[in-house]
Image: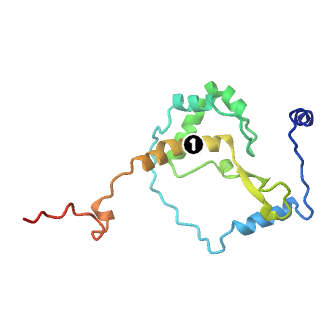
Amino acid sequence: MWAAVRQQTGRRHKDEVCDGITAETLNQHYARISTDSGYQRPPRKFTATHREVDFVSEWQLFSILDTLPPTATGLDHLLAWFIRLGAPVFSKTLAHLFNKSLSTPTVPLQWKYAFIQPVPKIASPLVHSDLRPISITSVLCRTLERIIVRQFLYPAIVAPLPLSPLQTNSHFVPQGPPPLRS
């Protein structure tokens, strides 16, 4: 069907098969360029509150789920249209899950996995570096990320909290205008 659509619209879509580029060689290439040999796992911090806090209400999550755009499906195979259609049923349970995740330093393990889709940077890729890795995570993970960005990151960027005197270096703190001389 898509071949007929492309023929009618004049768009060309070729699945280029590059010699020497296989799923295994791409995996090795991406692992090599994205691995830090000096990485040390940071110590676990327990700075999050362990009491249940409503960061997102059932109604807010319903409105987010109800307007999900059609998007790629992650490894959990939950389709965006299915979540959008079931928003009235899912929003209460998912709001509880999202609030629990934000209240404790945990994220569901299934949301940490992604499907890596190589996308060509150029028309005819010849080597591994001609392909860009696109990470496709779960729709629910992307929804939680969007909530975090909207509720925590944007406000911190738009109106950052002032630094306390303990966090500033007195050499760089402006002391006000210089005194007037008569």
- Residue 129: horizontal and vertical position, in percent? 78, 64
- Residue carrying label 1: 146
Name the residue type under label 1: Arg
Question: If the image is split into quadrants, where does the N terminus sit?
Answer: top right
Q: Is residue 24 above or below residue 36?
A: above
> Camera-side residue: 126 or 59?
126
Toward the bottom, the furthest residue is 38
> Camera-side residue: 47 or 171?
171
Q: Is residue 10 left or right of residue 171?
A: right
Tag 1's secondary structure? helix
Please say whether residue 150 is visible from this viewpoint. yes
Question: If the image is split into quadrants, where does the C terminus sit?
Answer: bottom left
The residue at the point 48 percent across, 46 percent down is 154
- Residue 120: horizontal and vertical position, in percent? 80, 54
Q: Is residue 172 left or right of residue 137?
A: left
Q: Is residue 126 left or right of residue 48?
A: right
